[in-house]
Amino acid sequence: MTTDTGLIRSRRAQLVLALVVILALAVVLFVVGSDGGDQAGAGELEGEPPPSFTFEYFDGGTGSLADFAGKPVVLNFWASWCPACVAEMPDFQAVHEELGDEVVFLGMDMQDISREAALSLVESTGVDYILADDPTGEIFQAFGGFSMPTTVFINSSGGIVGTHNGSIYAEDLTARINELLLPNG
């Protein structure tokens, strides 16, 4: 009888472990997106002006996209709890250093664990482009965001011209900026 009870417990433990693994995979797919490319959601706003919103800059004060009128903007939603976001941040910094005079980089910290966690990540990655806060995820939702990270490309006329759901690294980020935002690529 003890052997049967042990076998049942072992099978239950295996079933619970399998369910935990399945749930974890589902969460990962939700967070980083299914193929890391242009997808529905934020892409549905292409050709439209961006939603109107205000935000708080990391260094104090409030702002809006109107602060960058006449300049193309790369708006990247990130969070310290998002492994894909953490992985791409050094590449965003590198492209910012290369193209920062031509394009505004705005990193929007979405529903982070804490300001301290966000600041620690910023320090460890060396990011020095403009950072702002979306503590409730309201701005992310206004852009139709559904996976993290999400990057929105806004042209100098203030229209959304592209989105990217999932990680995007330096070479592809530069190519997208040249294709979507900069005259004569």
Image: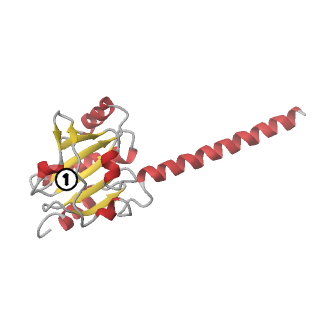
Residue 74, position as x, y percentages in the image: 21, 54
Q: Name which quarter of the figure residue 61 lies in.
A: top left
**Left or right position of 28 against 85:** right
Q: Residue at x 21, y 38 (%)?
A: 56
Q: Is residue 167 above or below residue 54?
A: below
**Front one among 73 and 182:** 73
Residue 96 x, y percent position in the rendering: 17, 50
The furthest residue to the right: 1
Give whichever of 16, 133 is nearer the camera: 133
**Is 40 situated above or below 65?**
below
Total number of numbered discs in the rendering: 1
Crowding around mark 1 (Cα neighbors within 10 Å: few <14, some 14 to 19, many 20+) is some
> Could you tell me residue 34's position as x and y percent?
45, 59
Q: Quadrant of the C terminus?
A: bottom left
**Which residue is more in the foreground, 57 or 148?**
57
Residue at label 1?
A: 95
Three-letter code for the amino acid on which mark 1 is drawn: Val
| Colour scheme of the rendered structure | secondary structure
Where 132 sits versus 181, above or below? Answer: above
Is label 1 in a helix, a strand or a loop?
helix
Q: Nearer the viewer, residue 171 or 71?
A: 71
Question: Residue pushed farthest top?
Answer: 116
Q: Residue at 90% x, 34% y: name it.
A: 1
Query: Can you give x and y, in whole percent of width and height, for residue 110 in the image?
Result: 33, 42
Q: For the view shown, which residue lies furthest in the bottom direction?
A: 184
Does residue 1 appear to the left or right of 159 in the view shown?
A: right
